[in-house]
Each structure stands twice: as C-alpha cells, then as structure tokens.
Image (tube, rainbow, N blue to C red):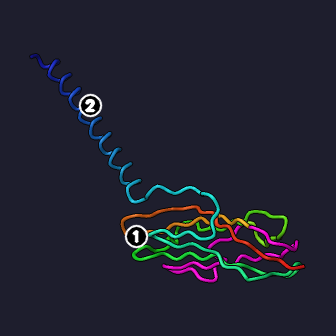
Amino acid sequence: MNWCTRKNLGVLSLLWLCSCQGSAKEKARNEAKTAPVAEAKSASAAVEKVEEASFELKSQSEAEYTVGQKADFEIMLHAKNEWKVNPDFPFSIEPEAHTAVQFEKKELGKGDAAEFSKKDIRVKVPFTAQKAGEHELRVKVSFAVCTPENCVPDDRVLALKLKVKG
C-alpha cells in the first residue's frame, strides 16, 4: 500500500469515526432531554374531580349564588406522596366563557393563587352571576407535578355546577 492510499484510508476512517460519535452524542442528548419528562396527558372530558396516584384536582363552590353579586369558586390541586408541584411550570386556570356568568379574568396564574406551595395550589376564581338557574361551568387547569426522577405536565378540564338565584 502506498502513502497516498494509506492517507485516504486514514481520512475515511477518521470521518466514519467522527460521524458515528456525533450521532451517538446526539442520540444521548435527545434521550437526556426527554427522559425526565413523562408524556403529558391531554385535556379530557370535563369532570368534577380528578384523582390520580400523583395528584388530586377539584373545585369547590358555594351552595348558592345570587345574580349580580360578585362571588368566586375555588380550584385546588394537591400533590400526593413524593410528588411536588412544579413552581417553574406555567400554571394556569382558564374558565370557559358562559352566558350565565361574567369572569373577571380570562386566565389566572401563579400570581392569583391564595396558596402556592410544594404540595398545594388553591386559587379563587372570581365571577359575577348573570342568570338565575343551575349552570355547568368548565375550567381548564394546566400544571405539572414532579418527583426527583420524573415530571408530568398535565391539562385537565373540571366541570362544576353553580346554582344561581334571581
């Protein structure tokens, strides 16, 4: 084998080695990015309460409200066992527009919380009732709960019934 052939083989071997290491590094980097985060659950059908192994999400309202008076209901999230609320995740509550009530805000966040701790979030959602009757409201809640090994972002839709007197 002459010098020129050895040089070409050396260059080809070096290029092959670099391309293999690059793809291995890229694969490891991508795996590291996705490993600690579990798949987010999508917003599903509206329910009054969600209870999972990692959290409990529920709403609480008064027995009755009055048309024209400012009032509120609460949304509460509790992280269970070793799970904790992720304070860095963009937590939000989005009440769905409804003809029976006028919400003060279209979206509430961490700054609106009456309580925001490692285990619990409690937010009062202010509104004014516009119509008498029984009404079902829907509220989308976005949050994440985490352990040291895993973080689960989630979107859930809560349904709550409001009884409004004239």
Q: Is residue 33 left or right of residue 21?
A: right
Q: Residue at x 75, y 79 (%)?
A: 72
Is 10 rendered above or below residue 106? above
Q: Residue at x 41, y 77 (%)?
A: 81
Residues drawn in magenta: 107-136
Horizontal and vertical percent for residue 44? 60, 57
**Residue most toward the left?**
1
Q: Is residue 132 left or right of residue 108?
A: right
Q: Is residue 43 left or right of residue 8?
A: right
What amino acid does circle 1 point to?
A: Thr
Q: Secondary structure at mark 2?
A: helix
Q: Is residue 117 left or right of residue 66?
A: left
* Towards the viewer: 130 or 136: 136
- Would you say the magenta stretch is mainly helix, strand or loop? strand
Horizontal and vertical percent for residue 119? 49, 79
The disc placed on residue 15 is: 2
**Residue most toward the front?**
134
Is 125 rendered above or below residue 45? below
Is 37 rendered above or below residue 124? above
Membership of 9 in magenta stretch: no
Q: Secondary structure at mark 1?
A: loop
Q: Which residue is mark 1?
A: 147
Quarter the C terminus occupies = bottom right
Please say if the residues under marks 1 and 2 sit with CB atoms less than 8 Å apart: no
The disc placed on residue 25 is: none
